[in-house]
Image: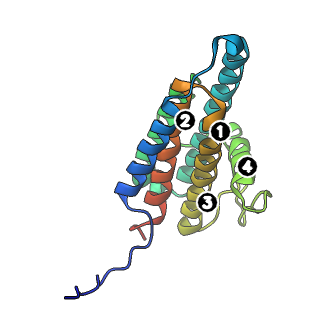
Amino acid sequence: MSFPSSPRVPTGPHRRSLLASAAGAALLVGCTGGSGSDAPHTVSAEERARARAARDSAGLVARYDAVIAAHPGLAARLRPLREEVLRHVEAFGGVAADSASGSASASGSASASASVSAQASPSGTARAAGPGDASGVPVTEKDALAGLAAAERELADRRAGTLLEVPGESARLLASVAAAGAAHMFLLTEGHG
């Protein structure tokens, strides 16, 4: 007996697969730990990894701020994701320079946004700003969301790639934040026009 095929073709990862991959990554790195002989080196590498992760998350917050400032109509959709990235900064030991309104500051966010934009571009070059747009944020909302999704994807991939370079707790935190980034990418690209 054959079953009728599903009328809906999935377009991206499902929530269950995102959660399963996050759990698998956490289990994979959960048993890794440094030996006593290399503990001073491991601590310093761990501190560097956490500091870099905090800076990367802070840059992503600046990117969200720049998009929200350029496209206020996206603010309600982007604020929850931005707030989660802000918590990632704090989780990695960084200091969250939060603005009450969630909008970009004049110079700091624009330069951080340009830096993140350059990192998120597939070719490694910064995207050109639109007419009259000095922040580097794409002119259309759709392109701005695609840029944020690309930044989230690039950062999640980079973090997943460094999981085995850091010990236990930091690796678990990186795995969790990488999974959150993958979920953010999915939320930025799926189901919202």
Which amino acid type corresponds to the residue marked 3 in the rendered image?
Gly
Q: Position of residue 53 (x, y in %)?
A: 63, 33
Q: Which residue is mark 1?
A: 162
Q: Can you say which quadrant of the picture contains the N terminus?
A: bottom left
**Tags 1 and 2 touching, CB below 8 Å:** yes
- The Cα atoms of the two marked residues, 1 and 4, are separated by 24 Å
First in sequence, mark 3 or 4: give its number: 4
Q: Secondary structure at mark 2?
A: helix
First in sequence, mark 3 or 2: give its number: 3
- The Cα atoms of the two marked residues, 3 and 2, are separated by 22 Å
- The Cα atoms of the two marked residues, 4 and 2, are separated by 24 Å
- In this view of the protein, which residue sits in the foreground, 187 or 43? 43
Q: Which residue is mark 3?
A: 147
Q: Is residue 118 left or right of residue 150?
A: right
Which one is in front in this view, the residue at disc 3 or the one at disc 4? 3
Count of numbered tags = 4
Tell me if I can see residue 17 in this picture. yes
Q: Position of residue 3 (x, y in %)?
A: 22, 85
Residue at the image position 61 percent from the left and 30 percent from the top: 54
First in sequence, mark 1 or 3: give its number: 3
Q: Which residue is mark 2?
A: 174
